[in-house]
Amino acid sequence: MKNIIIVTGGAGFVGSNLINYLINKTKFNIISIDDYSSGNKKNQLKTKRVKYINAHTKNISKSLNIYKKNIHSLFHLGEFARIYQSFFKMNECINSNTIGSHEVFNFCLKNKIKLLYSATSASIGNKGKDKNLSPYAFTKAKNLEMLENLKNWYNFKFEIIYFYNVYGPMQISEGSMATVIGIFENQYRTNKFLTVVKPGTQSRRFTHIDDTIEACYFAWKKNMCRHYSISNKKSYTIEQVAKLFSSKIKFLPSRKGERYASALTSMNLSNKVYKIFGKIKLKEYVEDWKKTLKR
């Protein structure tokens, strides 16, 4: 009986929110595969329906060997997921996004497991030119090419969901893997200047975690073998986001790999990209979040 869903990166920001959603919306048992390089044990749910395995995705076949006949589908979220950091953690990025992900793809292919892969807007912007801006964007773009080949070679079935600057509960707010909104929240909470990387005019379509998770579930439920994007209709510059917090701003030097726009696309690798737009507005989220603080 195929009664198990796998979530790689299940102790991370998106993965932990997805597991919580799947537990409430389905009757499946969940297994999380996470090496805790950015995931946190505090994000683990205390329920018998979820098993947490501390392992790297490059060892996924060994880690899941005894469960493989019972696996219904796999959400692959457990990759290195930061642009600037991928320049000085390139080996970690390649180890996760290339070696680890290819092992995940092969595991799903061999065992006829439906794959749902989290792609990134970083690899499709500027008419595809942004895919070479950083090791991160490059590895993610190459994974899409590999999946396209696996589809053509072996009729491999999968869903692709392009994420756009996800934010919300359980996001990382400190350290090198922190999200933009997480950083701003932490700086605001501790009465520090909000740090904006120059020029500050680079725009992003910040998308709430709840909208992102609902899109993942929608793609899984529909099972149409499609490419989807989940973003917000409204884009903000980084400086505009900082100003939503009504706090003092400090500009940081520009960084290599920086994208200047978060582009929507209708096609990628000859596949139509079905656009899903989130309902939660960033401005309202920030206003509500600020009300929860005692300042």
Image (spheres, rainbow, N blue to C red):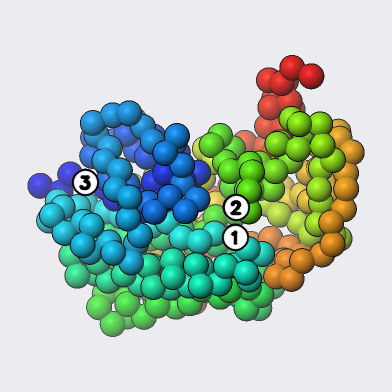
Q: Nearer the viewer, residue 152 or 289?
A: 289
Instruction: Tell which circle, 1 or 2, labels the residue nearer the N-terminal end.
Output: 1
**Residue density around tag 1, few if under 14, some if 14–19, many if 20 or more, within 10 Å:** some
Disc 1 is placed on an element classified as loop
Which residue was labeled with disc 1? 82
Question: Residue 186's spot in the image, x, y percent?
Answer: 70, 36
State which quarter of the image contains the C terminus: top right
Q: Is residue 88 above or below residue 27?
A: below
Horizontally, residue 212 falls left or right of residue 232, namely: left
For the residue marked with disc 2, what is the amino acid? Met
Real-space Cα separation, disc 1 to disc 2, in angstroms: 7 Å
Instruction: Tell which circle, 3 or 1, labels the residue nearer the N-terminal end.
Output: 3
**Residue density around tag 2, few if under 14, some if 14–19, many if 20 or more, within 10 Å:** some
**Residue density around tag 3, few if under 14, some if 14–19, many if 20 or more, within 10 Å:** many
| Residue drawn at point x = 28 percent, y = 64 percent | 59
Tell me, yes or no, whether the two marked residues, 3 and 2, touch with CB atoms within 8 Å: no
Which residue was labeled with disc 2? 177
Tag shown at residue 4: 3
Horizontally, residue 162 falls left or right of residue 240, namely: left
Q: Is residue 291 above or below residue 242?
A: above
Q: Is residue 139 visible?
A: yes
Q: Is residue 137 visible?
A: no
Tell me, yes or no, whether the two marked residues, 1 and 2, touch with CB atoms within 8 Å: yes
Q: Residue furthest top?
A: 294
Disc 3 is placed on an element classified as strand
Mark in front: 3 vs 1: 1
| Residue drawn at point x = 76 percent, y = 31 percent | 190
Disc 2 is placed on an element classified as loop
